Image (cartoon, grey):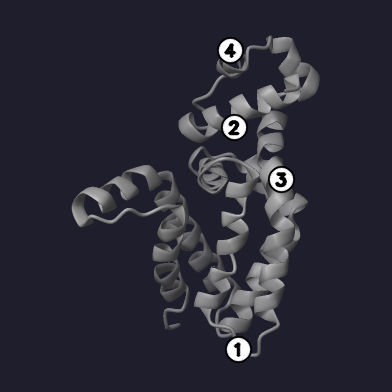
Amino acid sequence: MSTKNKILDAAEELFANKGFNGTSLREITSQAEVNLAAVNYHFGSKKELIKAVISRYMDEVSPKLELALLDVSAQPSPSLHQVFSAFVQPLLSLNEYRENGTSTFLQLLGRGYTDSQGFLRWFLTTQYPNVIDYFVQAVQKSYPDLTAEQMFWRLHFTMGTIVFTMSSSDALLDIAKNDFSKNLGVEDLIQQVIPYVAAGVAAPVH
């Protein structure tokens, strides 16, 4: 494995588990068994390393998400359930890309919000604008009565729900097993949350 990939793999695991703020470059270099100079050489800074970790996933998933969202928007009257369901297969395909890729990616996205990494949100919206644009277009087609302000709030609350759910995924799957005798996986968790967020975005406009 190349030095660059060793750093990316170590950073990905630590960022997902401990957060961006809670992980130091020294922890990353220690786990990757490289020196600090290697991080500076390959990435230049911690911010650039964070972007590189996210980009590995976004480069893989964004073309699939774009196609899925365009397919939904091409339907005459898509439901919000269909809009959110468009995310399922592209996200699950990340498990084929990397072990536990779906869960890790969603945890990393969540960290971008809970750790107040504003630069990361800017990076995602500028480097991968089609995913967000196509998603908003699909929601607008499904629920044209929403104003831009209402859209903002409802999608913000949706993101909060998904981030909290995925960041607690291990605990939730344990509860499902212990309390309800259900052996669920990440796909089941995603399928559980879709009707909830779809209903929230579809709430009547007052």
Identify the mark at residue 77; answer none if there is no mark: 1
Q: Residues within 10 Å of mark 4 (few under 14, many from 20)?
A: some
Q: Which three-letter amino acid code belongs to the residue tagged 3?
A: Phe
Residue situated in front as seen by the camera: 115 or 85: 85
- Which badge, 3 or 2, is on the more N-terminal residue? 2
Q: Residue at x 42, y 75 (%)?
A: 199
Q: Which residue is mark 3?
A: 123
Is residue 186 found left or right of 46 in the rendered image?
Answer: left
Q: Which three-letter amino acid code belongs to the residue tagged 2?
A: Glu
Residue 33 vs 150, above or below: the answer is: above
Residue 179 vs 31, above or below: the answer is: below
- Which badge, 3 or 1, is on the more N-terminal residue? 1
Q: How many marks?
A: 4
Mark 1 and mark 4: Cα distance apart in space: 53 Å
Mark 4 and mark 2: Cα distance apart in space: 14 Å
- Which badge, 4 or 2, is on the more N-terminal residue? 2
Q: Which residue is mark 4?
A: 30
Q: From the top left corner, tell me how far across and down residue 64 is, in percent.
A: 70, 61
Q: Which three-letter amino acid code belongs to the residue tagged 1?
A: Ser
Q: Which residue is mark 2?
A: 12
Residue situated in front as seen by the camera: 92 or 140: 92
Mark 3 and mark 1: Cα distance apart in space: 32 Å
Is residue 181 found left or right of 22 in the rendered image?
Answer: left
Q: Taking the image as drawn, is residue 100 in sight? A: yes
